[in-house]
Every structure is written in C-alpha cells, then in structure tokens.
Image (tube, grey):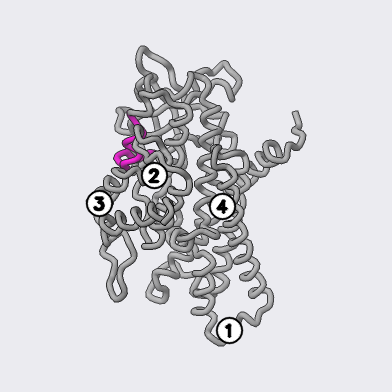
Amino acid sequence: MSSLESFREEVRTFIAENCPPSLRNPKPGEQRPTPGPDDIKKWAHAFASRGYSVPTWPKEYGGGSLGKDEAAIISEELARIGSYNPAMSFGTMMLGPVLLEFANHEQKLEHLTKIARADIRWCQGYSEPGSGSDLASLRTRAVREGDHYVINGQKIWTTGAHLSDWMFCLVRTDTSAPKHQGISFILFDLKSPGVTIKPIRLISGQSQFCEVFFENVKAHAHNLVGKENDGWTIAKRLLQYERTMLSGMGGGGRRGGDAQAKKRGNAGPAALAESARRYLGSDGSRLADVALRDDIARFEIDQLSFGLTTRRAGEEARTQGPSAASSMFKMYTSELSKRRAELMIQVMGYNGLGWEGDHFNAEETTTTRGWLRSKGGTIEGGTSEIQYNVIAKRVLGLPQND
C-alpha cells in the first residue's frame, strides 16, 4: 500500500469515528438529524486536532504541514460521505493565506490557530458606498493615536457581519497620498465600542449582507498587518484568494460539486439532468426541442471542461499562491452559474417560478431564489467587467490607456 493510500485509510477511519451523523449523508432508510451548534463545534475541534481543517498550513499555526495530495484526499473523503470541512470560511480561504504571507510571527500565533479551530468567524471590510468596483477610492479613515488606530467610516455588502466576531478591514491612513498608496490592512473585534451592524434585507427575505458603521472604533496597532499605507498590496493578494474561492464554488468536475451547488440554490450537471427527467417526463417530449437539448448538453460539457481546467491550473500552481488567472476562473464561474440557473428555470417551467404557497415544493422555491441569487455572482468579489480588465492587463498583457 502506498503512503497516499495509507493516508486515505487513516482519514477515512478518523472521519467515520468522529463526524457526527447530523453532518453526513444518512444511511439508507434513515433521515439526517438536524445539526446543532455542539455538533459543529465538536467536529471542528476534532478535525483541527489532526490539522485537517487547514492541511497545508504549518503545524505551529494549527495546520497539518501536509502536501496538496493529502489535502485533496481529505476533501474527497469528506465529499464521499456528504460532509464538509467545518472550518471552511473567509478565515481559512482568504484571511489565513494572507496572514501566512504578510503577517508577523506574533500575529500568526494569535489568529491562525483560532481560524483553524473555527473559534473565530471573520468578515471582510472592503466595499463602501461609492467604492465597490473602484475599491481604492475607499474613505473609511484610521488615525494612529498611541497604541491604537481610531476608525471612522462605513462598509457595505459585508457578508455575514451580523454573525461574525472579527473583521479584516481596509482603511485609509494617509489622505494626502495617491489613492492606492494611503491604504492599510487592519484586524479588529466587531464587539468593540462604536461598531454598528445593520443587515440588508434582500428580495428573498434573507439578510446575508450587512452595512457596518464605525464611530471612533479603537483597533490595536499590533493588529496592523504589514506596513502602514502599504495595505493595497495585501488587498490585491486577498482578492486573488477570494476569486479563487468563488471560482471553486462552481463545483464543475469536482467530487461533491452538485452537493455544493444545491446548498446555494442551484444544481450541478447531475442534478440538472435529474430535474430534466423529472419535470420533462420519461417520454422526453420537451427534449424534442432541439435548442433546449443543445443548451443542456453544451452547459454540461462546459461545466465539466471548466472543472478539469481549474484542477489542472491548481496542479500547475502547487508551489505558488493564486495568480491573476483567478480572475478568469471567477468570471467564468459566475457566468456559468447564471446559465445553470436559467436552464433550471427553463426545465422546471411554471414550477421554477414559485415563490411561496402550497403549489410549490421546497426544491422549487429554492431554485427560484437561486436563480435570482445567481445574478449577484457577477458582481460580488469584483464584477465581471473588472475581471475582464484584470485579465486584459495581468494575463494578456494588453496595452493600457493612461
């Protein structure tokens, strides 16, 4: 047995012994119990105790000091039983990698282990009213006073702020410098006096996003990451990790992709084909529509091809972090997700337009909300237009207008 095969057996045994039944696929004939906070916390701590939650991070910071192959095996074994990494979050996917690259040793010791154990939930303080796509025009101000920075301003479209403990935030620390040079990257507790969080009610009735106000909020100076006024370098790096994360949510060509897609109100290739059979009938009468049949086949081919492309790109970049190519993957993922949602509505017909009422089941109302939500994918994490600009400049090397 090879070392990787032995490692897979080790991971499979550990998951079987420690993953709560509420966080895995039920056995045939059984119903999955509703997971409680204790289940999730217990699973997160058990998973982190082996370094599995962030397998490629160094052990001293809560990781497993493992390679990419071992990390892939952990993901595959979780997908095999329908479970997930309990520490998967903005902390592990975005902030943690940036801290590993830019933070000092003390900052890494203070924050990374808590991220690995899912003890702290993080949110991202980037976008502001009037400073979304043009992120560098942000106005939230931080002024150094002794061993603190005093922060005043506002952030908007802050995902999960009302459920988070800490924020990683872009602030302006020099108003006289060019807009890309007077920015700093700082961390602070959202329970600090002066922080006000207001959820933004969406058309679906949910409140995933928030606006956050800062009035004389004090942030310890030792939580400034990198140098003062040099935060734009960190900000750009984090955006690459964010776009890599968003592109990875597409699920194309990956084990467990359909399960991830269903959680977001969409369906991957297998679920799309299943819905087509259910809603179009076994005789396939509506599939006689050549255009619909062609659209479904083209989507499935594109989805699988994209999944293979992202896997190949990941293997080619084993020794590096994400590059500007993450903009290509993020842009294509969001556009592909819109196509998927549109096809689901087309397949379901009238049933795909349900919002509430006894005439529609939970899958149908979820699909309708997923269709609306898919439009936001081309905006969050940088609009598709911004991604095209990054691709033109950083990937294709096209000339830029002054």
Check disc 3: other Cα within 10 Å, few if <14, some if 14-19, many if 20+: few
Q: Camera-side residue: 365 or 286?
A: 286
**Marks 2/3: CA distance?**
17 Å
Q: Who's the residue at 33% across and 33% down the image?
A: 190
Q: Which mark is residue 37?
A: 3
Upstream in sequence: badge 3 or badge 1: 3
Image coords of residue 348 (percent x, y)? 52, 74
For marks 3 and 4, give the CA distance.
33 Å
Q: Nearer the viewer, residue 348 or 305?
A: 305
Q: Do the residues bearing badges 4 and 1 touch, measured as CB atoms within 8 Å?
A: no
Element type at marker 3?
A: helix
Q: Which residue is mark 2?
A: 160
On residue 284, the disc is 1
In the image, farthest residue toward the left: 38
User: Is residue 255 placed above or below 69 in the rendered structure?
Assistant: below
Q: Earlier in the sequence, mark 3 or mark 4?
A: 3
Q: Which element type, helix, strand or loop, lies under badge 1?
A: loop
Q: Amino acid at mark 2?
A: Gly
Quadrant position of the C terminus in the picture = top right
Amino acid type at circle 4 is: Arg
Q: Earlier in the sequence, mark 1 or mark 2?
A: 2
Q: Secondary structure at mark 4?
A: helix
Horizontal and vertical percent for residue 79?
A: 41, 59
Magenta region: 110-122
Quadrant where the N terminus lies? bottom left
Measured from the top left, where is residue 147 in percent x and y?
Answer: 35, 15
User: What is the CA distance from the residue labelled 4 to the residue labelled 1?
Assistant: 34 Å
Mark drawn on residue 311? 4
Q: Classify 10 Å Cα crowding around label 4: few (below 14), some (14-19), many (20 and above).
A: some
- Residue 234: x and y in percent read 51, 29
Residue 331 at least partly seen? yes
